[in-house]
Image (tube, rainbow, N blue to C red):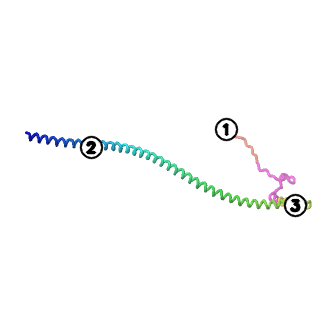
Amino acid sequence: MAGVTVYSVFRYTIILKEKSALLNNLSVLNKEIAQKEIEKQNLLQELDKEKELLEEFKVKNSLLKEELKASKNKISILTTNLSWTQTALATLGQKIETLKKENEILSLRLDVLTRERDDLKMRLSSIAELKKAIKELKRQARNGVREIKKKTQGVLGGNQGFIIKDGKPTYRARIKIEVSPAQADR
């Protein structure tokens, strides 16, 4: 029995050592599990933060896409306005050139008219020249009256506007009035 007791004590001490080793291993593993749980919680928190950041970035990205679309629309409108403005500017440039040419022509005409006016002033400032001008105007008036008479004589012809010439009416009656009795309705 002593052998069984020694064997049992020996076996009991081995089992106690194994138990304490297993308890040590278990406590180490529990510590590692607790650390892993803490790391897991930290990683979950970081993952949640990353998800929140990702959502914020998605919102910012959608806002930036909308701003980009609005900017593209503004750019297209501004491009259209620019082309219209350039066309209008080209048209105005052409009009300005035309007006400059007209201005040159008008200034030349003004110079000619100014010279003519000065010539007329000089001519009309002397009495002899005035007399010549009056005679010339009278001659032109007579020639104009003669030309008008020549033109109108060919047109008038006929009785020259007389209703009665040499005691006879020159205008024949074209209107014939007939009166007939009305028929009675039956």
| Cβ atoms at labels 2 and 3 below 8 Å apart | no
Give SS at disc 3: helix
The nearer-to-camera label among 2 and 1 is: 2
> Along the horizontal axis of the image, is 94 left or right of 147?
left
Marks 2 and 1, the one that precedes in the sequence: 2
- The structure residue drawn at horizontal position 71% and vertical position 59%, both measured from the top left corner, is 100
In three-dimensional space, the C-alpha distance between marks 2 and 1, rounded to whole angstroms, equals 141 Å
Q: Position of residue 144 (x, y in %)?
A: 84, 60
Marks 2 and 3, the one that precedes in the sequence: 2
In three-dimensional space, the C-alpha distance between marks 2 and 3, rounded to whole angstroms, equals 132 Å
Q: Position of residue 70 (x, y in %)?
A: 51, 49
**Front-lying residue, 53 or 31:** 31
Give SS at disc 1: loop
Residue at which label 1 appears: 185
Mark 2 surroundings: few (<14), some (14-19) or many (≥20) residues within 10 A: few
Given the image, on which type of amino acid does mark 2 rest?
A: Val
Q: Considering only vertical position in the picture, is 52 above or below 171?
A: above
Find residue 122 and name its label: 3
**Front-lying residue, 14 or 125:** 14
Given the image, on which type of amino acid does mark 1 rest?
A: Asp
Is-magenta flag for residue 167? yes
